[in-house]
Image (tube, rainbow, N blue to C red):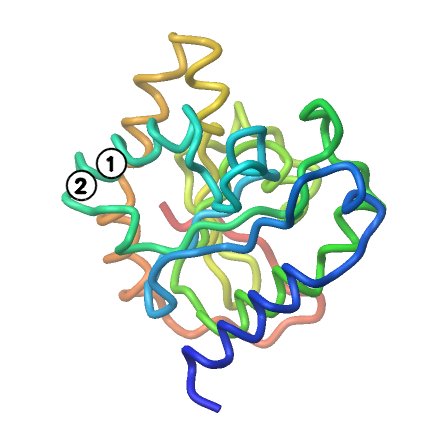
Amino acid sequence: MDKQAQYQAIVNDIKQHHCSLRDGCRQAVPGEGNINSPVVFIGEGPGKVEDELGRPFVGPAGKLLEEALTQIGWQRKDVYITNIVKCRPPNNRDPLPEEVVEHKSFLEAELSLIQPKLIVLLGRHALHWFLPGLQISQVRGVAKRFGSQVFFPVYHPAAALYDPKLRATFLSDINKIPLVLRKVDELPPAASQTPPAQTTIF
């Protein structure tokens, strides 16, 4: 099975699954974009517009993310964009830990397929899932390696829309991504450690 076929199989699994959130939303929302991208953007979960259209980050927050990408010469089709949970929680509430666990295998399958050099964590929920115990306000804009994977936490674009003071910070952090990618290419192989150590690289 080629890579595109594997991706389509993941999409089909996401669309056809049944979880505790499934009855309360219109449809499941798989990730989309370039499955060969070196960068994957991961948010929290679908919002109202995403639930209606079946695509991630197509509402106001998605428009700001697209704006941020254009400043580094990218379009959304150049990267892969997905969420921690694939179904919209009721009234856009935060997903519960058990709901995140229900969707864990989907995100793992996406990342296993794409094998990104860099994962951009959009907001505190994505940060907590991958790097628990850290505060987004303290680590945003700082690339961190955990094991063999490099993460780059930034504010969620929805937070930047809600608080205009965060907008410039969000755009500035996204602007760092090409440099972070170059730094990733220069990193030595991750040492084999159990558990893997978390290190700041940039």
Which residue is rendered at x = 51% and y = 68% of the image?
148
- Work out whether 166 lies above or below 6: above
Q: Report the front residue among 145 and 6.
A: 6
Picture coordinates of residue 113 (x, y %)? 49, 74
As drawn, is 36 to the left or to the right of 162?
left
Screen quadrant of the C terminus: top left
Structural crowding at the residue carrying mark 1, measured as other residues with C-alpha within 10 Å and reported as few (<14), some (14–19) or many (≥20)? some
- Residue at point 33%, 55% (across, down): 79
Instruction: Give me the residue at 48% from left, 11% from top.
Output: 162
* SS label for mark 2: loop
Looking at the picture, tell me which residue is in the foreground, 162 or 77: 77
For label 1, the SS is helix
Query: Which amino acid does the dot numbered 1 rest on?
Result: Asn
Q: CA distance from mark 1 to mark 2?
A: 6 Å
Residue in the picture at 49% in, 56% down: 145
Q: Could you classify mark 2 by the number of other residues whose Cα lies within 10 Å: few (under 14), some (14-19), or many (20 or more)?
A: some
Q: Amino acid at mark 2?
A: Ile
Q: Are marks 1 and 2 in contact (CB under 8 Å)?
A: yes
Please name whichever residue, 14 or 95, is drawn nearer the observer in this view of the structure. 14
Q: In this figure, which residue is indicated by the disc labeled 1? A: 175
Residue beneath disc 2: 72
The percent coordinates of residue 67 (x first, y second) are 25, 30
In the depicted structure, whether residue 55 falls above or below residue 112: above
Q: Where's residue 71, x and y in %?
A: 17, 34
- Horizontal placement of 114 versus 138: left or right? left
Looking at this view, name the residue that lies furthest to the left.
Answer: 73
Name the mark nearer the viewer: 1 or 2: 2
Q: Is residue 94 above or below residue 28?
A: above
Mark sitting earlier along the chain (1/2): 2
Q: Residue 164 placed where, x, y %?
A: 39, 8
Name the quadrant containing residue 142: top left
Residue 191, which numbered label? none
